[in-house]
Image: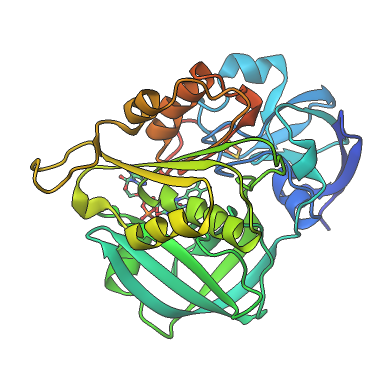
């Protein structure tokens, strides 16, 4: 029998039971407690927390970029990697009180592929229909983990739709990486009607209730998925906050969902879509913004104080956007982001 231990989180005063064969983050997710997290794989540091009492912990493999040795020695830990072997008290850092108690317990589900469509040369729009259970509750902006068929590997993908309640469907926008474990499967093998295993929801990239604040979204690549989900949710909820979506792509062939985003400018009062290309091929094929999305953001905005910012895409883009946003006046606590970290080999075995 596997032993369980009590883990208490401060300053929120929440207790959970964690089995030794579970990570603390996973046990919390199963109990509907949404602790701060991103990659769940020891890469992004979003779940970094501080041990107040107890230190008998085993850490799965993680990156020393996420938890350098000196921080480990000082008592920091990664909740997505930590297995407790005694009762613990943990101080949460950067937690979001609004999110923490609003978690939806994670579910494992089987789904059937409905369609796979190319939306750009290297991005696919995947729609699956839940078979068992037939509904998976999630908040717009969250993600699920797919098991790569025939392997023990899993990959995270954010929903682009807002609910599975009406038609049991989940929608994803997935970028293909050459040689990628999931990418190759999606591109070459996955077929309509095939069944896939998913687990979720995870993630804290959800729209915070702050009706007076303007919104700025910054996205790149498949970071389109959760931002589209948030924008679609704003239409459904008739949110009228001023909102601008800065989307960075390389060339015109990398843009997708343009028609829907332009239509959103009509249906969402105060919404503006600003795509920018870093590598337009000719002046004729693009009359819009050019340059890095962070430079375009700086050129368009002079004061973002009081604004809520949502950033999603490849880690370098997210890391570049955060200081630009805070430099323009966004409160660092009001920059919400999802880094699409890779699952590659971590550089440290903890
Ligand atoms: C919270 C979260 C949500 C995510 N949501 C989405 C989503 O909605 N859509 C989506 O497409 N992806 C998303 N991702 C990324 C996704 O989970 C995979 O990491 C990605 O699709 C690559 O998986 P793969 O198996 O194809 O490639 P891997 O086998 O993992 O990698 C193969 C090669 O591709 C390179 N590579 C992989 N990812 C990247 C990257 N981001 N940038 C540069 N090179 C890379 C790797 O370095 C490696 O050399 C998300 C990740 C996280 C953590
Ligand atoms: S969620 Fe733990 S390091 Fe990313």
- Image height of 64 relative to 201, above or below: above
Nearest the viewer among 64 and 263 is: 263
| Quadrant in which the C terminus appears | top right
Q: Which residue is drawn at 58% across and 60% down?
A: 235
Nearest the viewer among 194 and 292 is: 292
Identify the coloring. Answer: rainbow
Image quadrant assignment for residue 246: top left
| Quadrant in which the N terminus appears | bottom right
Q: Residue at x 59, y 22 (%)?
A: 305
Q: Residue 43: x, y in percent?
A: 51, 35
Q: Residue 171: x, y in percent?
A: 49, 68
Tell whether 209 sits left or right of 350. right
Ligand 2 shows up in the quarter that is top right
Tell whether 3 sits left or right of 219. right
Tell whether 161 sits left or right of 17. left
- Image height of 9 relative to 155, above or below: above
Nearest the viewer among 120 and 288 is: 288
Callout count: 0
Q: Which residue is drawn at 39% across and 33% down?
A: 317
Image quadrant assignment for residue 86: top right
Nearest the viewer among 260 and 62 is: 260
Tell whether 296 sits left or right of 270. left
Report if residue 343 is visible in the image. Answer: no
Q: Residue 163: x, y in percent?
A: 62, 68
Farthest-out residue, bottom: 193
Report if residue 164 is visible in the image. Answer: yes
Q: Residue 318: x, y in percent?
A: 45, 33
Image quadrant assignment for residue 212: top right
């Amino acid at each position: 029998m596997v032993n369980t231990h009590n883990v208490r989180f401060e300053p929120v005063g929440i207790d959970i039971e964690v089995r030794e064969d579970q990570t603390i983050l996973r046990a919390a997710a199963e109990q509907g407690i949404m602790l701060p997290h991103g990659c769940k794989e020891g890469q992004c540091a979003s779940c970094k927390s501080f041990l107040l009492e107890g230190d008998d912990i085993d850490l799965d493999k993680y990156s020393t970029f996420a938890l350098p040795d000196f921080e480990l020695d000082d008592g920091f830990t990664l909740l997505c990697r930590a297995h407790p072997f005694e009762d613990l008290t943990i101080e949460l850092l950067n937690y979001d009180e609004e999110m923490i108690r609003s978690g939806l317990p994670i579910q494992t589900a089987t789904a059937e592929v409905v369609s796979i469509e190319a939306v750009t040369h290297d991005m696919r729009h995947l729609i699956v229909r839940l078979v068992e259970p037939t509904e998976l509750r999630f908040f717009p902006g969250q993600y699920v983990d797919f098991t790569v068929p025939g392997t023990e590997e899993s990959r995270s993908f954010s929903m682009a739709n807002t609910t599975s309640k009406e038609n049991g469907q989940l929608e994803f926008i997935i970028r293909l990486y050459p040689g990628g474990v999931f990418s190759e499967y999606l591109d070459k093998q996955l077929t309509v009607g095939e069944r896939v295993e998913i687990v979720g929801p995870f993630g804290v990239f959800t729209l915070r209730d702050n009706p007076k604040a303007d919104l700025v979204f910054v996205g790149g690549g498949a970071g389109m998925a959760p931002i589209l989900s948030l924008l679609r949710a704003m239409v459904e909820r008739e949110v009228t906050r001023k909102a601008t979506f800065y989307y960075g792509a390389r060339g015109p062939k990398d843009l997708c969902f343009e028609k829907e985003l332009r239509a959103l400018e009509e249906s969402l009062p105060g919404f503006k879509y600003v795509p920018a290309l870093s590598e337009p091929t000719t002046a004729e094929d693009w009359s819009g913004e050019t340059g890095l999305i962070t430079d375009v953001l700086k050129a368009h905005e002079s004061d973002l104080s009081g604004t809520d910012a949502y950033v999603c895409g490849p880690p370098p883009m997210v890391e570049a956007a955060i200081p630009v946003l805070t430099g323009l006046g966004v409160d660092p606590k009001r920059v919400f982001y999802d880094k699409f970290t890779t699952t590659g080999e971590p550089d440290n075995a903890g």
